[in-house]
Amino acid sequence: MSFQVTFATKWSDFDPNRHMRHTAYNDYAAEVRVRYFAKYNFSIQKFTKYNLGPILFTEETSFKKEIHLGENITVNLKLEGLSKNNERWKIVHEVFNEAGKLSAIIKVYGAWIDLTQRKLTTPPEETKEMFASAERAENFKIIELKS
């Protein structure tokens, strides 16, 4: 299943060159992740209930085409990797400009952290559907955890 969100960009997303500033791309990708989690009943309120949150180990952005002031953008989410216990995940976002041209690719490698112990943790059982329903990237792989 494809998950994507279309956004109206804001004045603050742009730099003096009149194209979208580099960190704005990543902000929109983060918003898509949070909305995806919420769609599967794993909202910010559930993060609080379970005292956990998503963290990123890496975030890599490749820029392909400019996004200009006033353009709307569409950002999708695909699962590129997942550990068997759902603790770690790799997500790829594609950012498209208003004309539908690929403008950026954002890859993140993340996990869940217990906010009290400040250690990685396995998420609750209810996250299984969330990850099972995610569209798989062409290069999807199981993330092997080292003992």
Image: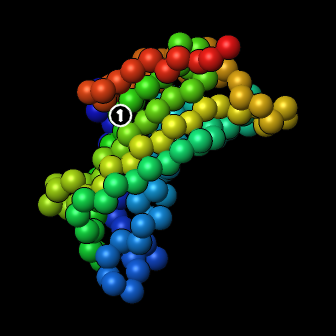
The picture places residue 26, in percent across and down from the top left corner, at 46, 56
Q: Name the residue rendered at 65%, 31% in the picture.
A: 112
Could you say whether the residue bearing mark 1 is in a helix, strand or loop?
strand
- Which residue lies most toward the front here? 146
The picture places residue 114, in percent across and down from the top left corner, at 76, 31
111 on left or right of 6:
right
- Would residue 126 be visible to someone looking at this image? no
- Which residue lies most toward the bottom here? 16
Q: How many marks?
A: 1
Q: Nearer the viewer, residue 66 or 53?
A: 66
Q: Name the residue rendered at 39%, 21% in the picture.
A: 141
97 on left or right of 60:
left
Q: Quadrant of the N terminus?
A: top left
The picture places residue 16, in percent across and down from the top left corner, at 39, 86
- Would residue 19 be visible to someone looking at this image? yes
| Image quadrant where residue 47 sits | top right
- Which residue lies most toward the right here? 116
Q: Quickly name the residue at label 1.
A: 78
Q: Nearer the viewer, residue 88 or 5?
A: 88
Relative to 118, say whether 14 is above or below.
Answer: below
Amino acid type at mark 1: Lys
| Crowd band around label 1 with a 10 angstrom C-alpha radius: few (<14), some (14–19), many (20+) | many
Q: Name the residue rendered at 77%, 31% in the picture.
A: 119
